Image (cartoon, rainbow, N blue to C red):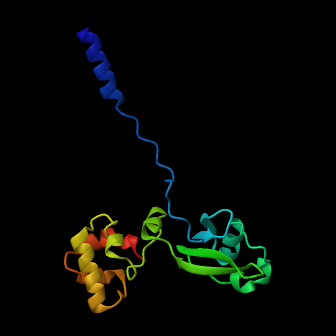
């Protein structure tokens, strides 16, 4: 019995573990630069988050979501030609006697942006948003927002170095989360 156990152990040591296969794309990979991510809601049959080619963001997203407005959207060229940045929201309302489409623009919640791998705007995030990031607790989040209130908008992510508690290592860790 001991001989069998030694033989099995010797075989395992000699063969060793096989190297792991390289990991593929993750479920939450960052979308390619040529694609945009937009959330559409409101008077549409299919509300949700859509990926579209940047040049046709508004047009493509509106038609993919299937608007419930009876008016002809193609005649409302101002709606279909307006450029929209990735990470934004479009809320479509059908208003008036002609059921004309009206769009209200906004920004996705920080939690949604992070889930989609999209950067946050350092000048718009709240303390609660900052606390979603690894390495930022309530105290550091408060320092960042207080610094922004006292000194105005951040010109670049590197200005975080002026916030007490953020050094080069922390900046490197956080910089990928901001645009």
| Residue 178 makes an appearance in the image | yes
Q: Nearer the viewer, residue 43 or 32?
A: 43
Find residue 71 and report its horizontal and vertical position in percent: 78, 77
Location of the C terminus by quadrant is: bottom left
Query: Of all residues shown, which one is farthest toward the top?
Result: 1
Q: Nearer the viewer, residue 85 or 45?
A: 45
The structure residue drawn at horizontal position 32% and vertical position 81%, both measured from the top left corner, is 158
Location of the N terminus by quadrant is: top left
Find residue 5 and report its horizontal and vertical position in percent: 27, 15
Query: Of all residues shown, which one is farthest toward the front?
Result: 97
The structure residue drawn at horizontal position 19% and vertical position 79%, both measured from the top left corner, is 164
Picture quarter containing residue 138? bottom left
| Residue 37 makes an appearance in the image | no
151 vs 118: above or below = below
Q: Nearer the viewer, residue 145 or 42?
A: 42
In the displayed structure image, the side of residue 111 where residue 151 appears, left or right: left
4 vs 35: above or below = above
Find residue 142 and report its horizontal and vertical position in percent: 25, 77
In the displayed structure image, the side of residue 22 where residue 76 appears, left or right: right
In the displayed structure image, the side of residue 23 where residue 74 appears, left or right: right
The structure residue drawn at horizontal position 43% and vertical position 66%, both measured from the top left corner, is 111
The structure residue drawn at horizontal position 61% and vertical position 66%, both measured from the top left corner, is 51
Find residue 66 and report its horizontal and vertical position in percent: 72, 66
């Amino acid at each position: 019995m001991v001989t069998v156990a030694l033989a099995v152990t010797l075989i395992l040591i000699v063969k060793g573990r096989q190297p792991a296969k390289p990991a593929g794309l993750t479920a939450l990979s960052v979308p390619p630069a040529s694609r945009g991510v937009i959330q559409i809601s409101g008077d549409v049959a299919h509300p949700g988050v859509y990926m579209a080619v940047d040049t046709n963001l508004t047009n493509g997203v509106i038609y993919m979501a299937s608007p419930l407005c009876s008016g002809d959207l193609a005649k409302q060229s101002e709606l279909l030609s307006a450029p929209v940045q990735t990470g934004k929201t479009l809320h479509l309302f059908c208003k008036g006697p002609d059921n004309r489409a009206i769009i209200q623009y906004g920004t996705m919640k920080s939690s949604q942006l992070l889930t989609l791998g999209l950067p946050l705007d350092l000048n718009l995030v709240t303390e609660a948003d900052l606390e979603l990031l690894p390495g930022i607790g309530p105290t550091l989040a408060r320092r960042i927002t207080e610094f922004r209130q006292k000194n105005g908008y951040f010109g670049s992510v590197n200005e975080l170095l002026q916030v007490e508690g953020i050094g080069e290592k922390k900046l490197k860790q956080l910089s990928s989360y901001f645009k």
